[in-house]
């Protein structure tokens, strides 16, 4: 499973819920990019690759470079629509974790699930992670 986190586009409470839920996916390939102050504010899983980024779209560019297309689950944590095309084209199931503002039609697709962990305490996020790690 790939996990791409655009830490610049989610608030700290949502990021904290994501970090807690990632305990359910210890073998996930986690990449976190964002402003140094944001990425350093949290204790990411030990396997996470944390990439401090600066400048407009800096985190997006770093995450795009690490993405690889495969049929495995993809978790995208972002609060904007910059990864809509990637999500629609990903061959496997996709979970978009963001705020209610990221529930754009741009992310519509048969394999795309959208959740806001602040709306349900992270229940849908945890459920998707548990289902996705089963063979």
Image (tube, helix red, strand yellow):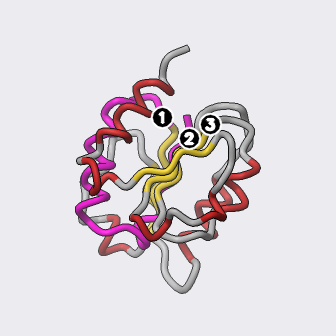
Which residue: 52% across, 85% down? Answer: 55
Q: Is residue 127 magenta?
A: no
Q: What secondary structure is found at the residue carrying circle 3?
A: loop
Position of residue 83 measured from the top left corner of the image (x, y, whole percent): 63, 63
Q: To which quarter of the image does residue 73 belong?
A: top right
Question: Under tag 1, what secondary structure?
Answer: loop
The local crowd at label 3, few if under 14, some if 14 to 19, many if 20 or more residues have their Cα within 10 Å, is: many
The part of the chain drawn in magenta is 1-28
Query: What residue did someone put label 1 on?
Result: 28
The crowding category of the residue bearing disc 2, from other C-alpha atoms within 10 Å (few below 14, some 14 to 19, many at least 20), is: many
The residues tagged by marks 2 and 1 sit, at their Cα atoms, a distance apart of 6 Å
Q: Quadrant of residue 81?
A: bottom right
- What crowding class fits label 1: few (fewer than 14 Cα within 10 Å), some (14-19), or many (20 or more)? many
Q: Earlier in the sequence, mark 2 or mark 3?
A: 2
- Residue at 49% x, 17% y is 134
Q: Which residue is label 2 attached to?
A: 2
Is the residue under label 1 in contact with that under label 2 (CB below 8 Å)?
A: yes
Question: Which label number is shown at residue 93?
Answer: 3
Dots 1, 3 in contact, CB < 8 A: no
Task: Give the alpha-carbon distance from disc 2 to disc 3, as whole Å.
Answer: 11 Å
- Identify which residue, 90 or 61, lies in the foreground: 90
Q: Position of residue 75 (x, y in %)?
A: 52, 45
Residue at left offset 59%, top offset 43%: 94
Q: Secondary structure at mark 2?
A: strand
Q: Earlier in the sequence, mark 1 or mark 3?
A: 1
Q: Quadrant of the N terminus?
A: top right
**Which residue is at the front of the view, 135 or 101?**
101
Badge 2 or badge 1: first in the primary sequence: 2
Q: Position of residue 106 (x, y in %)?
A: 66, 64
Indicate yes or no whether the magenta region holds residue 21.
yes
């Amino acid at each position: 499973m790939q996990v791409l986190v655009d830490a610049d586009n989610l608030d700290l409470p949502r990021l904290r819920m994501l970090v807690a839920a990632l305990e359910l996916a210890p073998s996930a390939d986690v990449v976190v990019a964002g402003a140094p102050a944001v990425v350093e504010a949290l204790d990411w899983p030990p396997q996470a690759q944390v990439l401090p980024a600066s400048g407009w779209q800096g985190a997006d560019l770093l995450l795009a470079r690490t993405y690889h297309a495969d049929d495995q689950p993809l978790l995208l944590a972002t609060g904007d629509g910059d990864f809509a095309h990637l999500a629609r084209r990903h061959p496997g199931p996709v979970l978009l974790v963001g705020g209610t503002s990221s529930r754009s039609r741009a992310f519509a697709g048969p394999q795309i699930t959208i959740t806001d962990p602040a709306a349900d305490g992270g229940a849908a996020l945890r459920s998707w992670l548990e289902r996705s790690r089963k063979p």
